């Protein structure tokens, strides 16, 4: 009987991540990062955010290219819907963080992934954002994650 062995490749370099963890544990000052985004208001509720770099490991870093995100509100809020709502961008960021973590852990444990999907829902009463009811919290009331 022959057993075929296929290397696991989820696109995560586990050895490099573990090496970084060890190095940062030994040099905690290098583990201090500052993430930055610059947002420019364009018109109405429409804005554009750009991410170009960050600091960490004791130095400044520049991404290979600037990343741009359009944000707006949907038409039902008397807006033009030219981008995802800011709260949707927050949920997308959370989903991206969670799926990246799943991929990294799976790679480390030798598990080949076929697909990973995270659906994130945030419940919110918009009367809080609109300032229409002082008793309604401004923000998410709860966040649900489904994998």
Image: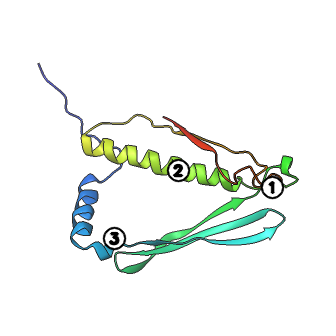
Mark 1 and mark 2 residues within 8 Å of each other at the beta carbon: no
Is the residue under label 2 in contact with that under label 3 (CB below 8 Å)? no
**Mark 1 or mark 3: which is in front?**
1
Percent of width and height locating residue 60? 43, 80
Name the residue nearer the viewer: 112 or 134. 134
Q: Residue furthest top?
A: 1
Residue density around tag 3, few if under 14, some if 14–19, many if 20 or more, within 10 Å = some
Q: Alpha-carbon neighbours of circle 2 within 10 Å: few (<14), some, or many (≥20)?
A: some
Pointer 3: what residue?
A: 31
Q: Farthest residue toward the left? A: 1
From mark 1 to mark 2, how far is it between C-alphas?
Answer: 24 Å
Q: Residue at x 60, y 54 (%)?
A: 90
User: Residue 8, how many percent across, how many down?
Assistant: 28, 40
Which element type, helix, strand or loop, lies under badge 3?
helix
Query: Residue 139 versus residue 85: which sits nearer the camera?
Result: 139
Q: Which of the labelled discs sits on residue 28, or is there none?
A: none
- The residue beneath circle 1 is 130
* Residue drawn 73% across the image and 55% down it: 83
């Amino acid at each position: 009987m022959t057993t075929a062995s296929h290397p696991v490749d989820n696109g995560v370099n586990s050895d490099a991540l573990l090496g970084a963890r060890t190095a940062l544990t030994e040099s905690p000052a290098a583990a201090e990062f500052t993430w930055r985004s610059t947002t420019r208001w364009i018109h109405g509720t429409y804005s554009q955010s750009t991410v170009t770099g960050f600091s960490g490991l004791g130095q400044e870093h520049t991404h290979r290219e600037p990343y741009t995100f359009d944000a707006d509100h949907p038409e039902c809020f008397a807006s033009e819907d030219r981008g995802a709502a800011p709260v949707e961008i927050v949920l997308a960021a959370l989903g991206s963080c969670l799926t990246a973590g799943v991929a990294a852990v799976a790679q480390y444990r030798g598990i080949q992934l076929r697909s990973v999907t995270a659906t994130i829902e945030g419940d919110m009463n918009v009367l809080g954002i609109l300032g229409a009811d002082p008793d309604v919290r401004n923000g998410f009331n709860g966040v649900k994650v489904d994998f």
